[in-house]
Image (tube, grey):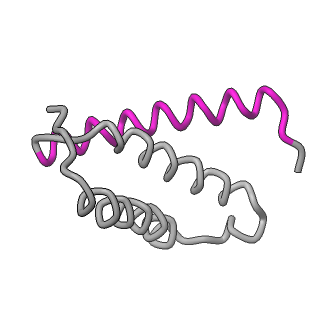
Amino acid sequence: MSYNRNSLKKDIILCFIMGALYMVLEGLWRGWTNISMLVVGGLCAFLIGRLNERPTFCRCKMWQECAIGTGIVLIRHVKINNKSKMRRIF
């Protein structure tokens, strides 16, 4: 699988937009969020988007993709929140 400059730009934009959207939704839902959620939301979007481009993962059900995203966010909360007190943004 070749990776060109246009794909890189598309992936960076996708990561930023989806990470920002995740951050805003979390802020609205919980009342606060952290800047690290920008990275986590972008990473989830990137990984799920890459999995959808592979023929073997195109048959994944929506609940399986949600489980991948939930696992990434859960790992982030367990690892990072327990090690340090994060500053709230909202």
Name which residue lies at 10% across and 41% down.
Answer: 31
Q: Which residues are magenta?
A: 3-30
Question: Residue 88, how many percent across, how many down?
Answer: 16, 38
44 horizontally vs 8: left or right: left
Answer above or below: position of 34 versus 44: above
Answer above or below: position of 8 versus 69: above
Q: How many marks?
A: 0
Magenta-span inclusion, residue 31: no
Name which residue lies at 66% across and 30% down.
Answer: 10
Name which residue lies at 66% across and 60% down.
Answer: 51
Question: Residue 2, how many percent across, how many down?
Answer: 89, 44
Name the chief secondary structure element in magenta. Answer: helix
14 horizontally vs 35: left or right: right
Name which residue lies at 32% across and 57% down.
Answer: 80
Q: Residue furthest right?
A: 2
The image quadrant of residue 71 is bottom left
The image quadrant of residue 13 is top right
Which is more toward the observer, 54 or 35?
Answer: 35
Magenta-span inclusion, residue 25: yes
Which is more toward the observer, 52 or 70?
Answer: 70
45 horizontally vs 29: left or right: right
Answer above or below: position of 31 versus 90: below
Q: Residue furthest front?
A: 83
The image quadrant of residue 25 is top left
Question: Residue 47, how many percent across, how many down?
Answer: 59, 55
